[in-house]
Every structure is written in structure tokens, then in C-alpha cells.
Amino acid sequence: MKKTFMYSLGVVLYALLALSWISDRDNIQKRSRILAGDSSSSKKISAGKLISPDLFGIFFEDLSYAADGGLYAELIQNRSFEYNPADRKDWNPFTAWEYTTQGNGYGTISVQTAAPLSVNNLHYVVLNVEEEGIEGVGLTNSGFDGIVVRAGEQYNFSVFVRQLSGESMPIQVKLQSKKGTVYGEAAFSTLSKDWKKYTATIIAAQSDDSARLVIVAKAKGKIALDVVSLFPQKTFKNRTNGLRADIAQAIADLKPKFMRFPGGCLVHGDGLGNIYRWKNTIGPVEQRTEQRNIWNYHQSVGLGYYEYFQFCEDIGAKPVPVLAAAISCQNSGRTRGTGQRALPMNEMEAYIQDVLDLIEYANGPVTSTWGAKRAKAGHPKPFNLQYLGVGNEDKITPEFKDRFKLIYDAVRVKYPEITLVGTVGPAPSGEDYEQGWKLADQLAIPVVDEHYYEKPEWFLRNNQRYDTYDRSKSKVYIGEYASRGNTLFNALAEAVYMTALERNGDVVKMASYAPLIARQNHASWNPNLIYFSNTAIAPTVNYYVQQLFSTNQGDRYYSNIVSFSDGEGVRDSTLAASFVRDSKTGDLILKLVNAGRTASQAKVNLAGFGSINPKASRAILTGTPETGNTFVNPGHVIPQTSGFVVGKSFLYDVPPYSLTVIRIKTNDDPKASH
Ligand code: AHR
């Protein structure tokens, strides 16, 4: 009895001792949170951990008018008269167009499909001029909520016309105001009974944010018109069929290491017939197959696979195209999770061939079938495709698994050099996540795509998510994430998380915020990284966080550099730091995030590094947590940069609600590893 009592007392004492030791340890850790290890060491530090050189990139989806009416610089809406009620109930081939007659002319317009310009582009307009009057009879396009023209700028107009009856027709094209003031015009005469392309350059004499394009015929007769197009000559990098320069530049300024495209749900589509087929999006624009957009509008696919690859090259981003896994979106038919459809097995061979052909299109020699098409489009050199996504947050059903495996095996056999990216569902946990990872383990998929849209607190709470990921398994691409808001606090929660992505850059290979861009008043999804209107760009605070990280990436991560001594245990998840080195420049890059309301102090110890230049640069993003950027005040919360003096060891006062990036030049050989 006595023995048992003594034994129990011993157990209790031991437990109390252990508890007090644990609580002591916690208190010490809380008092001096060593975020990147022990900062007291002055010995030469280890080589650092190799992290992904492709960590921060972008994800472009044709969502919220990101392509047509957005990045794609075409100014004419519904240029091919292909809009229809399947896109949106009240749409038809005349959406954004109206019948126009000035003076006392009259005639009719109708939509026809016989002998089209291309079988892929069936609808065209027949203009029947019965009496041309003084000004002619024709059509007016109002663009995407108006056409923006700038005084002195040149615009490339083109149209396909077929003469149906009468003699050669004089055609006049005008850029004019809503009320009819003409800013610039061009004229030509039709010649051909077959479809023929006519082009003209129009110079705008005045600026207008809401101009119209008017095209009128000035003689009796009948003509067919299709693909009426107007581009500013100044597109991004002056490319024809190009991109809106200001939006493209804002994206380029992120210096993304990669670009995932052309979408998420858009890719696997609203039902099998709506799967995004890359082959429909290449070649001459008038021969591409337009289609309904799952986001309730229309895709001209003028911004198609060729243009996506070209854009990636232009901004130095590795292309990461995503193809459907021969499975439609589980939310197809506007269901919530049960609308997944699978392509019949007897169609899989052809589908897989399409997948393989994409790789040939991107990388094949000009002598190959698909490489030749790329060359014909103007790019004989390969696009150097390295990554290919298959599937987008699909429901991991038996149908999905079977089809994914077939595609995966075929790609591995024919193109073992391609890194295939699989998918593990739409959430950070749950059935699809579990099943997706199980499949990834079974097949040893090189990279899997995780998605999550969560509250900022989730990002703060979960910043250790990848610390325990098994390094021997598939690597992770966080293809879509966002903290459901565009305030500074949201952006800082994301910044805290991004320091963890750097820390785990050995297992997290890539990450991209989503969605990237959205047109003002047409957003099908919020929040986004960049908002735009016809005339302006409003990058969010989240954009500047992404930019600070992506323009300050490294390829080695170092522990044992930073510690915080704020004496507040409760603040663990709002304070974060990371420290990387960029081998190309030899620069050391420190990121400090404080998503909390109390200032802190960081101790930085660079003793393990060789000679450093004390004149560093600093960018700091800070403000009131609930504010953000708007069209009215787009520069409300933006990074401020300045010089900053550092030493081998220094203290840094970390302001509340801030992200600081300090970039330090070293006098070392950039190639030397520490
Ligand atoms: O980014 C918006 C959408 O979110 C994507 O299309 C889809 O993959 C996800 O559900």
C-alpha cells in the first residue's frame, strides 16, 4: 500500500516537473521567438536549404472578363457574331451591335450561316442596303462598355466581307462618339464574291473613353460581314492579335516565374461539351472555335494557346498549361458537386493524342506536325514547355482516376522530361484531398495542385502546414489560394503564409494567388489580385505582397538568422520571417511580416555570411489593416522603398501591420554557396 502510494506520488511529481518544464520551454519560446533558428551563433552557417527556383508565379483564368474585354486587346465585342443565348439568356449574334443608318438610307441586317467564313465560325451578318441615303447603312459596335480611343493613336481595323449582290460596294469605317462626332475614318471598296479580308488604319483625332465603331455600306446591294476587329497598334510588345499593354505590364511587373493558364473551372468546363480544347484556340482567329464561358459569358479564344505561350515568353514566365483530365467540372450544370461527367473510354485515345500534341506544339521541331503549326504562327523556336497540369480540383472519382492514369502514363512514356502536375481537390483537406494524395502516392505524380480560399486567420493558423509534409512524396503546387479579401490585413496574412512557403520551398515547388485579374463591374469572383476598367488598373494590396515576394525570390533558404523578442506569446502566428539568398546576384533577402497590431523587434544575425555591403535597400508595405486600394485611390497602400544600413548583426523595429523586405548585397562570388 505504502509502496503504491510512494509510486503514485512519484508519478505525480514527475508529471508536475515535466509540465513546468514544458511551460518554461513554451514561455522561453514565446518570449524570444526564434523564427529562423538560433540567432546567437556566429560560426559560418550551413549551405542553406535548396528551394524551388519557380516558387512564385501567376494563375490566369478567363474569368471576370479577364481575356475578352480584358487582357486581350480586341476592342470590338462579339466581333464574329457568335454570341448566343447559351452564353447568356439575353445574348444573341447582335449583342453589342446595332443597326445604323444616318441620313435617309434604309435596309436590313440579318444573321446567316450558309457558306460561312469557317465551319468553326458559322454566324455572319448580311447587310442588305435598299437605299444608301447620304451616310450609308450598316452597323455600330459599342465595344466592351465603350471603346477607348486616344488622340493621335493608331488603330488597326479589319473585317471579312463577301459580296452577295450588286456591284463593288464602298464601305466606310468610322471611330466616333456616342453622339456621332467622327474621330477618324477609313474607306475601301469590296471586290470579291468570296470571303476576303480588308484592313485599314484609323488615327483617332480625339480621346474618348466611350467611342463606337461604325461600319456602313454606301451603295445598294448585299454584303456578308464577319470578324469585325479593331486593335490599338500599341499592344504589349506591339504584337499583332496582342494584349492590352497596361494590364499585361502590371502582370509582367510581378516577374512571375511561371504562368498557369487558361483557367481552373474554365478548363474542365460546364459539361463535356464545354471542356476547353486547346486545338480550337490556335491558328488564324477567324478559324478558331468560340465557346461559352463557364463563367457565364463568351470566349472568342482570340487569346488562345499560341498567345498564352507567347505572353509567357514575353514576361519570362514558364508556361504551365492545364488540360482537363477528360472529366468535366463537378459543378457542371450549376450543380454543387454532382455534375461531373467523364469522356467515354472509346474517346480517350483521341483525347490523349490531343494532350501529346500540345507538348509537340510547344516543344516539337518545326518538322513535326504540331511544331510546324507553331512555326507557321510565327514561333519556329520551341516554347520550352516543362510543366503540364492535368485536371483542376476535380472530384477524385473512379472515372477521374482511370482517365487521369491513362493520360499520365501516355505523357510519361512519350515525354518523360515533362513534369506532370496532378490535382488534389478544391480544399486544403477533405475527401478529394485525401483521395487525390492517395492517387499521387500510388502513381508517384511529380507535383500535385492544392487549392484553398480561406479566411486570413486560416493562413495565420496554418503557416506550419508544410513543415511536416513528407519530403519523399510528390511536390506541391499551390495553384490557387487567397484569403478572401483585399485589405492590408488579408495581404499580410498571405505574406505570413508566403514566408512559410519559402521555408518549405523544398516541398512547395510553386504557388500562385487566384484569381489574377477582374474587370470592374464584371467580376464573377472576388477577391482578385488586379482590378481593371477600360481605362485604369487598380492593383490590390495583395498584388504588392505578391510582387515583393516574387521580385525577391531566392534559391536557398537559411534558418538561424532572425529572432523576435516581443514578449507576447499570443502573437506567434502574426509574426513571421524568412531569409533567402539569390545565387544569381549573391543577394541576401530578408522578409519580415507583422500582421498584428503591436510593434515587435527582430534581431538579425548575418555573422555566418562573408562580406556584406552595409548599404541595403528596403521596401516596406504598411498602413491601417482594414484599408486597401481602389480605383479612386489605387496608391493608398503601396510599398515605400529606401536605402537601409545593415550590419553583420542588427536590430529591426518591425512596425505593426507591415511587410518589410530588406535586400542586402554581398561582396561574395554570387555562385559560392554558404
Ligand atoms: O479561381 C476561381 C476558381 O476557383 C477556379 O476556376 C477554380 O479552380 C476554383 O474553384
Image (cartoon, rainbow, N blue to C red):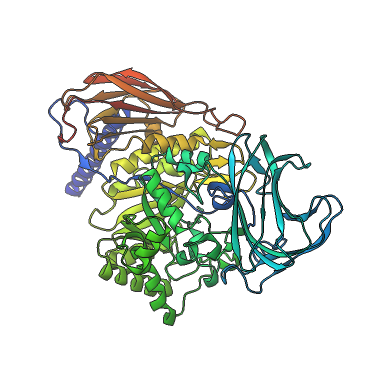
Q: Residue at x 57, y 72 (%)?
A: 119
- 192 w.r.t. 516: above or below: below
- On screen, residue 129 versus residue 335, left or right, reads right
Q: Is residue 9 left or right of residue 592?
A: left
Note whether 32 is above or below 545 in the view shown: above
Q: Residue at x 33, y 65 (%)?
A: 360
Q: Residue at x 35, y 60 (%)?
A: 362
Please tell me which residue is depicted at 42% across the width and 82% down the height of the picture.
346
Residue 107 percent across, percent down from the top left: 82, 61
Q: Nearer the viewer, residue 664 or 230?
A: 230
Residue farthest along the bottom direction in this orientation: 346
Name the image quarter holding residue 166: bottom right
Q: Eyeballing the image, is 253 above or below 409?
A: above
In the image, 285: left or right of 177? left
Task: State the residue in front, 481 or 421.
Answer: 421
Q: Position of residue 146 (x, y in %)?
A: 68, 45
Task: Confirm whether residue 261 shows in the render.
Answer: no
What percent of the width, then of the height, locates residue 183?
70, 39
Please say if 429 is above or below 592. Answer: below
Quarter of the image with the C terminus is top left
Residue 338 picture location, percent across and down: 54, 69
